Amino acid sequence: MSLTDTAIASKEARSLDPAAMLEQLRAAAVTHVVTVPDTHQKSLLALLAEEGDPALVTVCTEDEAIGVAAGLWAGGARPVLLIQNAGLFASMNSLRGISLDGRVPTCMLVGEYLRDPAVPSRRNAARVVHLTEPTLDVWGVPYHRLEQDEDLAVIPAAYEQAMRERGPVVLLVGAPTAAR
Amino acid sequence: MSGAPSTGMLRTQAVAAVAAARGRCLSISTMQATAAWVACGQADERNVNLLGSMGSASAIGLGLAVARPEEQVMVLDGDGSLLMQLGSLVSIADRQPRNLYHLVFENGVYETSGAQPVPGAGRADLCAMARAAGYAQVARYRTPAEITAGLPSVLAAPGPALVSLVISGQGEVDRSAAPDLPDFGTQLANLRSSLTGSAA
């Protein structure tokens, strides 16, 4: 197998188990998943739509998603966002105004659309991928990586980090969720 | 206010009439209505003033309404604010929260930046947009008397409702009686604590 073949095989093989992600969301006692749908996480979205727990709330923009999640939190619920990297960039003013300045716990699953999973995020060709981590660093937003199923156990801890630190915590979904 | 409607009421009059109808509603106030709302004694533990994130009041109201279906939620929005997240009309209508009442103070301008007209001032119809999006109720009031006569009936019926309040001027806000309030994040956390009985 050539190096190119190996890279392709690695890219094809790497995916995340949507059922295991759902299990971790439930372990985090998440009540609502607020989403502008993400290509990377489409099988998780399909599973959430089937299961109904946590409840799926689909909105039009990622700015709105951060606001809706803040309202859910104020009402005593435990929401998580499920969006795409391009949507993270679209939501930056609400991320600043609500999650950072307003100190609202905001745990976010952010799919790395256009990411080649075989290549580290910062070395991907697409700006929407390689600018994500540096942007979060500049903004002081903590993040964790979900690259393989073994990483999924961090979800409840990341959720509690957002609650404890009263701010945003991003879970970068570096591989697509597997077809079901 | 060159973009302001030629007919309508003073904002202070509108706010006073809305405050009289509020009852036990949770409220999210933003932008132009906030100072008058606070001066009317509405900045209690069931109210949050959103500052620093223009456009997000309706989204926060939607989340609150979904989390607390047993409560009525009143959003005091501005036309410029709503235009920043106009998709929220569709998101709200999609969810059909029966307990969400979305009041929009339509003065036709971006007031704090120098009263530039908002896009569509005098042309775009927010009530028609809300109706087309799927809101259960829409209403437009041009006088305090219309608010007093109409708003209680709106609040007595299921939402989501959009109520346009046509504002032609600011009125005088007596800020001397306004309390010193904590920042937005603290107000939101305090609301959460009061609703859940636990610290944020």
Image (cartoon, coloured by chain):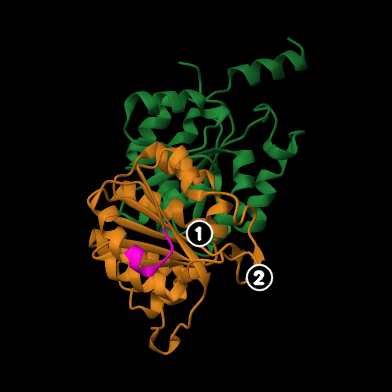
In magenta stretch: residue A77:
no
- What secondary structure is found at the residue carrying circle 1? helix
Give how far across and how far down residue A23 sits, in percent. 36, 31
Amino acid beneath label 1: Ile
Instruction: Find the distance from the CA under tag 1 to the CA under tag 2.
Output: 22 Å
Give how far across and how far down residue B106 sits, in percent. 51, 61
The chain that hosts pointer 1 is A
What span is colored magenta in the figure? B141-147
> Looking at the image, which residue is at 32% across and 42% down?
A29
Count neighbours of disc 1 (C-alpha within 10 A) and say few if under 14, some if 14 to 19, many if 20 or more: many
Q: Quadrant of the C terminus of chain A?
A: top left
> Looking at the image, which residue is at 52% across and 39% down?
A60
User: Which one is in front, A8 or B8?
Assistant: B8
- In the rendered image of the structure, the colour used to display chain A is green
Q: Quadrant of the N terminus of chain A?
A: top right
- Tell me which corner region of the image, top left, top right, bottom left or bottom right, holds residue B200: bottom left
Where B86 sits versus B133, above or below? Answer: below
- What secondary structure is found at the residue carrying circle 2? loop
Camera sees residue A154: no
- In the rendered image of the structure, the colour used to display chain B is orange
The chain that hosts pointer 2 is B
User: Which one is in front, A109 or A145?
Assistant: A109
Residue that numbered label 2 is attached to = B113
Residue that numbered label 1 is attached to = A98
In magenta stretch: residue B143:
yes
**Taking A3 as reference, is A111 left or right?**
left
- Tell me which corner region of the image, top left, top right, bottom left or bottom right, holds residue B191: bottom left
Amino acid beneath label 2: Ser
